[in-house]
Image (spheres, rainbow, N blue to C red):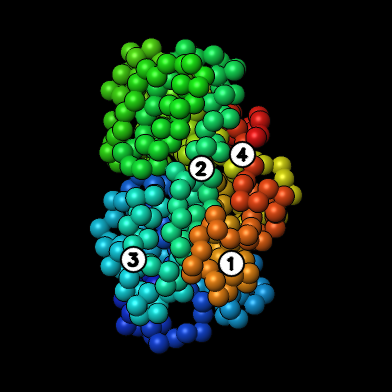
Amino acid sequence: MNRFAAELFVPTELAELRDGPMAASRSSYRIALLIPLCGAAGLWAPSCISSAQAAVEELNRGHGLNGRKVQLIMIDAAQESSLPIEETVNDLIESRSIDAIVGMHISAIRQRLSKVVRQRIPYIYTPLYEGGETTAGLFAIGETPDEQLGPSMELMQSQYRPKSWALIGNDYVWPRMSHLNAKAKLKQLAVNLAYEKYLPFGLSNMARHVDDIAMSGAEAVLISLVGQDAVAFNRAFGAAGLHDRIVRLSCAVDENALLASGARNSKRMFVASSYFASLPTEANAAFKEVYYGLHGDQAPVLNALGQSTYEGVHFLAGLLQEQPRTWQNKSHGAIPPVIHRSARQRQGTARPNRAQIYLARADGLKFEVINSF
């Protein structure tokens, strides 16, 4: 265990926050890090925790937040979790046990929690999402389908000229809204839609759905499956040998999913994202220096979802500095660009509220960036 991990006290039971010695203490600034610790998206948890810890390390080298050292409180925000997330978060806010939320979880959880948090504490929502979030006091900082999908589908269409596409995703708001965007783009490009399917979380056997896509005649497939579900799909896709005649595109497959899928199951797979571990940028180099300096060479894999928690903690710091009294009545789109540290762009305001999007190709067990827009 590294020095910082040993010093960072994270309660294993939320009761410690309510009834233990932490309850009466107000010495630290407590950020509830809401991430999936189980289920399909649990694949991302180690990267998300480690990246958020890197941001906390940077803040605590200085003055922390509001003059207090920053402390992370991990809370399971998986769709599959048995934890009553709304009740838990409400209790923690009511008891003043947490000062802010940084959430990297699916949009269905965000929609539920937005009705609970109610501007009482800042809520930073970090991953890519479907767009349109305007709740006051909730700041969604991730990229959206109109930024990711349109340009990347055009590039795929230009290079491979598929006559028709298949769309497959989990059954919740982000895949459905993403696919509305994708269908509009297909219509604009005069390309057919051959197949569309939405699946429950945790479906390990994807062979039937892969066979259905093969039989549909689709020559490209957009994968909007989360975490381990995307891994299961890629493994079934590779086992069926479909990469020779069908190209894949995703906005959510990350380095963890690539490793779990395996090189032989990831041929001709492309991903559109605002961050890849391989980005040769100054901002990413600075992030990696802190990340590996803190966690060592065997640290969890860097990826877009983990980077988002790093950025989310720093966005919170920037928000409290620039909007200390007015954040409660505003949302991300209603404030000037918040100056904050990011591995996507460092203290960047060159493209306010809009991150660079990269298109990468799976190359063995890593991503090679081939274009940007």
Q: CA distance from mark 4 to mark 3?
A: 32 Å
Kind of element beneath mark 3: helix
Position above or below: 49 against 201: below
The C terminus lies in quadrant:
top right
Q: Amino acid at mark 3?
A: Val
Instruction: Give amino acid for label 1.
Output: Leu
The kind of residue on which mark 2 rests is Thr
Residue at 49% over, 67% down = 329
Q: From mark 3 to mark 2, how far is it between C-alphas?
A: 24 Å
Q: Which residue is mark 3?
A: 116
The three-letter code of the residue at mark 4 reads Ile
Q: First in sequence: mark 4 or mark 3?
A: 3
Is 91 placed above or below 54 here? below
Q: Earlier in the sequence, mark 1 or mark 4?
A: 1
Residue bearing mark 1: 319
Q: Earlier in the sequence, mark 4 or mark 2?
A: 2
Q: Secondary structure at mark 2?
A: loop
The structure residue drawn at horizontal position 53% and vertical position 68%, both measured from the top left corner, is 327
